[in-house]
């Protein structure tokens, strides 16, 4: 049985991948957010659909799943620097 995809209301799609990492999208008629759950729930895309504006900054350095070696707090030096700034 095939159901037509609707174009209104909230929709969640958790069957996607981006560069080998699990991706979830949530969207309605106004906004779409893409969350890279395979990389610690980073927000990959936040689009305001009526004006087609993506509010996320895109890093000039691309990444791949091999770049991910744990989360930010696994690096004690980086954590110490962060706490010193705060």
Image (cartoon, rainbow, N blue to C red):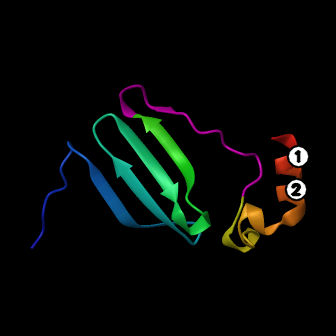
Do labels 2 and 1 touch, CB within 8 Å? yes
Quadrant for residue 57, please give it: top right
Q: Could you say whether the residue bearing mark 1 is in a helix, strand or loop?
A: helix
Question: How far apart, in angstroms, are the residues tagged by discs 2 and 1?
Answer: 6 Å
When the figure is inspected, residue 30 is found, relative to residue 2, above or below; the finding is above
Q: Position of residue 73 (x, y in %)?
A: 75, 63
**Residue 55 magenta-highlighted:** yes
When the figure is inspected, residue 63 is found, relative to residue 26, above or below; the finding is below
Q: Nearer the viewer, residue 84 or 34?
A: 84
**Which quarter shows the C terminus?**
top right
Q: Could you say whether the residue bearing mark 2 is in a helix, strand or loop?
A: helix
- Label ID, residue 73: none
Residue picked out by circle 2: 80
**Which quarter shows the N terminus?**
bottom left
Left or right, 65 with reference to 60: left
Quadrant for residue 30, please give it: top left
Left or right, 5 with reference to 71: left
Q: Residue furthest top?
A: 51
Task: Determine the residue positioned at 44% across, 31% down.
Answer: 52
Report the magenta residues as a range: 49-62
Local packing at callout 2 (Cα closer than 10 Å; few below 14, some 14-19, many 20+) is few
Q: Position of residue 15 (x, y in %)?
A: 38, 69
């Amino acid at each position: 049985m095939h159901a037509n995809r609707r174009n209104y209301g909230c929709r969640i799609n958790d069957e996607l991948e981006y560069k080998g990492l699990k991706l979830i999208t949530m969207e309605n008629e106004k906004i779409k957010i893409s969350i890279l759950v395979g990389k610690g729930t980073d927000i990959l895309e936040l689009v305001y659909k009526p004006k087609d504006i993506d509010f996320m900054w895109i890093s000039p350095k691309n990444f791949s799943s091999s770049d991910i070696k744990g989360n930010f707090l696994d690096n004690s030096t980086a954590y110490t620097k962060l706490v010193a700034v705060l």
